[in-house]
């Protein structure tokens, strides 16, 4: 695995599940890692554990649906660790509810967290990556960004949207050596899957290995890829 020594990574949703495994593997690859989630105990605990293993790490609390809070969070990362070279937009929420029972607020919240959050962070971090002529952005989408899952209209819309956002941004910044890609996992053994009725097909570390590959060894030619992890 290529080394991320000297690079700074920001992982949203890093307090548990897939994001936590990504934070661990990016630290293992040598990156300084900022871990962001809405609840500080979770992100601080992951950052503490990374530091115990010898990594530079920072735990942060912010809601990815809040653009102002993200600006402050990124400024904290820059002060503590340096400019963000690797951005993993993993934070997400799943809503399982039939359309007839959904409120406007349900729809807005899922779109705000799963789609607007990655936009806010890319807008804040990617122009500087392009200026420095190196950057890696991985958006954690879902196989529900390819398929229509009943009872998950807002979630599917957010992940289909995230895929389109990923490909458009990839085309915008590829010439500046910034790789932008998405990973589309199937059922993964995390809190989010609990109660869904689906059996886990893989562990968070399996998804993290693919994310880490995209942040390290993947050739720039893979920019814009939507990497499916679904048999
Ligand atoms: N598990 C699956 O089967 C599966 C399959 C396909 C795709 N995915 C995608 O993978 C990503 C991670 O999911 P997971 O399964 O690891 O879920 P998870 O175990 O529920 O973890 C979600 C993470 O996102 C954080 N988060 C949630 N809302 C947030 C917000 N508004 N602002 C900041 N952080 C927030 C959570 O921390 P706090 O609660 O502390 O904020 C937590 O760290 C999601 O984008 C999900 O859609 C999951």
Image (cartoon, rainbow, N blue to C red):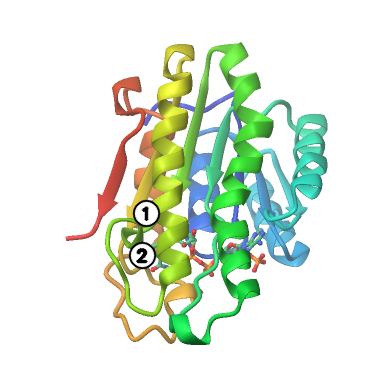
Residue 203's disc is 2
SS class of the residue under badge 1?
A: helix
Q: Quadrant of residue 49?
A: bottom right
Between residue 94 and residue 76, name the one nearer to us. Answer: 94
> Residue at position x 49%, y 13% from top?
176
Residue 194: x and y, percent? Answer: 44, 82
Q: Residue furthest left?
A: 231
Which of the two residues, 141 or 149, is positioned nearer the viewer here? 149
For image coordinates 76% across by 52% down, the residue present is 60
Crowd rating for badge 2 (residues with CA inside 10 Å; few <14, some 14–19, many 20+): some
Q: Is mark 1 within 8 Å of ligand 1?
A: yes
Question: Is 39 placed left or right of 89 in the picture?
Answer: right
Where residue 203 appears, as percent x and y from the top left, is: 36, 65
Kind of element beneath mark 2: loop
Q: Are marks 2 and 1 in contact (CB under 8 Å)?
A: yes
Left or right side of 136 for 182: left
Q: Which residue is mark 1?
A: 207
């Amino acid at each position: 695995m290529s080394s991320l020594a000297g690079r700074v990574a920001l992982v949203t949703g890093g307090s548990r599940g897939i994001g936590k495994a990504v934070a661990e593997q990016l630290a293992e690859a040598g990156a300084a890692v900022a871990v962001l989630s809405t609840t500080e105990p979770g992100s601080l605990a992951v950052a503490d554990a990374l530091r115990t293993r010898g990594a530079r790490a920072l735990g942060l609390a912010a809601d990815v649906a809040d653009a102002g809070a993200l600006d402050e969070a990124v400024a904290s990362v820059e002060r503590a660790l340096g400019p963000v070279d690797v951005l993993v937009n993993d934070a997400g929420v799943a809503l399982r509810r039939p359309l007839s029972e959904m409120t406007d607020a349900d729809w807005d919240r899922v779109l705000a967290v799963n789609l607007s959050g990655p936009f806010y962070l890319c807008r804040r971090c990617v122009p500087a990556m392009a200026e420095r002529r190196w950057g890696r952005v991985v958006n954690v989408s879902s196989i529900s960004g390819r398929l229509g899952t009943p009872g998950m209209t807002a979630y599917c819309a957010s992940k289909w949207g995230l895929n389109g956002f990923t490909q458009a941004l990839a085309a915008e910044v590829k010439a500046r050596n910034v790789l932008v890609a998405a990973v589309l996992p199937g059922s993964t053994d995390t809190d989010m899957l609990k109660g869904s009725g689906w059996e886990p097909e893989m562990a968070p570390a399996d998804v993290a290995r693919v994310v880490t590959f995209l942040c390290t060894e993947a050739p720039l030619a893979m920019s814009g890829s939507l990497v499916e992890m679904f048999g």
